[in-house]
Amino acid sequence: MTATASEGDDRIIRESGIDARIALIVQPVLRGIGFRLVRVHLSGQNGLTLQIMAEREDGTMTVEDCEEVSRAVSPALDVDDPIEKAYHLEVSSPGIDRPLVRKSDFTTWTGHLVKMEISIVVADRKRFKGKIAEAGEDDVLIERDKAAYGEEPTVRVPYDAIADVRLILTDDLIRDALSKDNRARKEAKKRRGEPDDDESGAEADATEEHEQEL
């Protein structure tokens, strides 16, 4: 079972197995309160931990947002009961060195360095490190970080071949992420009619933990 069955899921990288089942449960809840799912992962960390990574449509995510998401998804998880054992629920922002899961993510972060794993062999490799040079409709153009002798400096990877991709933390990424976050918060305040207090600094790794006892 995969999350591809979820109506309105525009992610190109989705979960499988129990993670996919959980994603199907929480996605409509998140959409209903103005958030979008980035990733779901059930791990053996601290006994059993369900990690839900989410963000607002503008890419922001505060500690208060994490708390709101946790309060909203907990009842839905209790009703559907997808996990048989007791677990911790951890809701977090994607962070600065975030995973890219939508085509729009590649457009947003064009020019930045990524690590990518793919499910098929492309240009004799299944792993790439390089900058996003161009985000197309069907594929992404990666400018290799260090092309070996005889290798083309760029490689075009189809979206449907990508298994995992994450931004690599650099000074440029930090500056760009803080700038984007600040602009998004100011625009959100304008929409709500709130005064701009010119706050700088992003809550990039907001996390709220909630322990579920089933």
Image: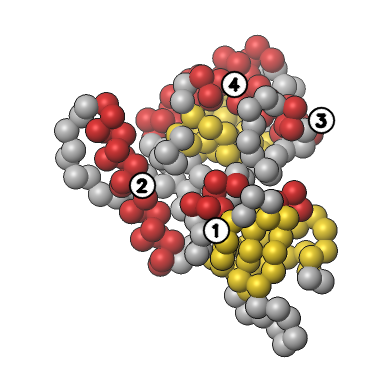
Residue 105, which numbered label? none
Give the Cα separation between the discs numbered 2 and 4: 25 Å
Q: Earlier in the sequence, mark 3 or mark 1?
A: 3
Residue neighbourhood size for the residue with mark 1, other residues' Cα within 10 Å, grouped as few (<14), some (14–19), many (≥20): many
Secondary structure of the residue carrying numbered label 4: helix
In this figure, which residue is indicated by the disc labeled 1? 167
**Tag 4: amino acid:** Pro
Give the Cα separation between the discs numbered 4 and 1: 27 Å
Query: Which residue is at a point 27% across and 26% down the rendered structure image?
Result: 192
Residue neighbourhood size for the residue with mark 4, other residues' Cα within 10 Å, grouped as few (<14), some (14–19), many (≥20): many
Q: Earlier in the sequence, mark 4 or mark 3?
A: 3
In this figure, which residue is indicated by the disc labeled 3? 1
**Tag 2: amino acid:** Asp
**Tag 1: amino acid:** Leu
Is 54 left or right of 41, judged from the image as shown? left
Secondary structure of the residue carrying numbered label 1: strand
Residue at the far bottom in the pictured view: 149
Secondary structure of the residue carrying numbered label 3: loop
Check whether the beta carbons of the residues at disc 3 and disc 1 lie within 8 A of each other. no
Query: Which residue is at a point 60% across and 44% down the rendered structure image?
Result: 102
Check whether the beta carbons of the residues at disc 4 and disc 3 lie within 8 A of each other. no
Residue neighbourhood size for the residue with mark 2, other residues' Cα within 10 Å, grouped as few (<14), some (14–19), many (≥20): many
In this figure, which residue is indicated by the disc labeled 4? 28
172 vs 87, nearest the viewer: 172
Residue 132 visible, this orientation: yes
Residue 47 visible, this orientation: no
User: Where does residue 65 sit, x and y in percent of width and height?
Assistant: 41, 30
Q: Earlier in the sequence, mark 2 or mark 3?
A: 3
Give the Cα separation between the discs numbered 3 and 1: 28 Å
